[in-house]
Image: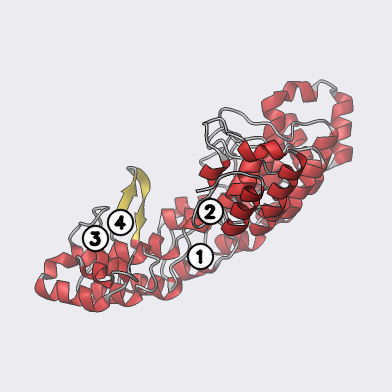
Amino acid sequence: MLAGHPELARADIYAASAAGDAAAVREFVDRQPALVNAKGGPFGWEPLLYACYSRVGSTLEVARLLLERGADPNAQFLWHGNLPPFTALTGAFGEGEDTINQPPHPDRDALAKLLLDAGAGPNDGQLLYNRHFNPDDDHLKLLFSYGLEDAALLGEELWCAARRNLPERVKLLVTHGADVNMPGFRDGRTPYEVSVYFGHEEIAAYLLEHGAKKKELSPDEKFAAACIAGRRDEVMAMLAEDPARLEKLGVRGRVELVQRAVEANSPDGIRLMAGLRFELSGTMPHDGVGVNLKATPLHNATGRLELVKLLIELGADPNVRDLSYHATPLGWAVHMDQRDTIDYLMQFATIFEAVENGGVERAAALLRDDPSLANAVDQDGHSLIDYIRNEMPRRDEIIALLRAHDLHTR
């Protein structure tokens, strides 16, 4: 839109801030200085927030100008009324659960330092949450240099790092005062208990050396930990003592343990549980503690190709749909732009998925085996034509393929 109509960037200070037009922003605040902290635009935000959350090129100079003119470096908003708030600093770093659609600002580090130097608070709970999915610790090092010290935030970060097997992050947090015995608010376990439960022995040993209280797991917890870590001898010994242990776990318990093995990146655990006939494609209507049970382990493994391949090799169903979005694992891979996973899972795609995602070879193979698929209709009454979009990959090849099978395309 800007390429065709550059004047849009000067519609108001909010558009100018989002478009990175520093000259226009300067004109607006020269005429009306109060605009620098005035809320407006489509989201009811201050101009600085539009600059920090925009990804339309660089908005660094706009942010610098706004801060020089008195913009509040701690500008923030509540997403659907939820705490913690999303701040300008949160916007600079981006990422989170939907990282592919929320990339970091192109001048992330420079913008973050600009905000922090202007007085942005380093104890930013949403920023820390958004970044805890990424093993890189540069954000923590920067925030520590500006005074990150909130005990509750550090404790939760330590719990997450222990759970996700990030030993360097654990050491960094402990070095900066994180409480090694603070329970995580999601499950009430301490970082040490979580590291033992997930089989992260290096982290467990480090935490013990730095003051963590050792606590013995219950028999059920020991069994779960052994399953997740893939300690076959220990699991088989416990089953010999109590053959009903698997039955007592129930479907939900077995599904959750497979999911936790995926989260812990434990192929040994997945293999062990598959051999014990744990459900590899199970879903549950309600999530577990910190784990998505509304999707299958294969959905949650998206982005880790080796785990995806392993699960399929062991019998996981690639066509099961999750309970939240009614999408297959391929759909998740497409949403997160995981190209390697997309290429691998395309061999299992339906004709609709193949057409929608430019899977020319898969679509051709399906049509070769069953030419009538050219006129297939999905459960909502949509034909293959409805899956063709202007921006889809290999669009022209898909259209040519469908025309070759006598499907009339518009």
Q: Residue at x 81, y 20 (%)?
A: 244
The 10 Å Cα crowd at callout 1, few under 14, some 14 to 19, many 20 or more, is some
Q: Which residue is mark 2?
A: 157
Q: Which residue is mark 3?
A: 46
C-alpha span from label 4 to label 3: 8 Å
C-alpha span from label 1 to label 4: 20 Å
Q: Which residue is mark 4?
A: 76
Mark 1 vs 4, N-terminal side: 4
Type of amino acid under label 2: Glu
Q: How many marks?
A: 4
Q: Residue at x 34, y 62 (%)?
A: 88
2 or 3: mark nearer the eye: 3
1 or 4: mark nearer the eye: 4
Locate residue 37, reporting x and y percent.
19, 63
Locate residue 224, reporting x and y percent.
74, 35
Q: Secondary structure at mark 4?
A: strand
C-alpha span from label 3 to label 1: 26 Å
Locate the N terminus and report the quarter of the image it occupies.
bottom left
Asked if disc 2 and disc 1 are in contact, CB closer than 8 Å, the reply is yes
4 or 2: mark nearer the eye: 4
The colour style of the image is secondary structure
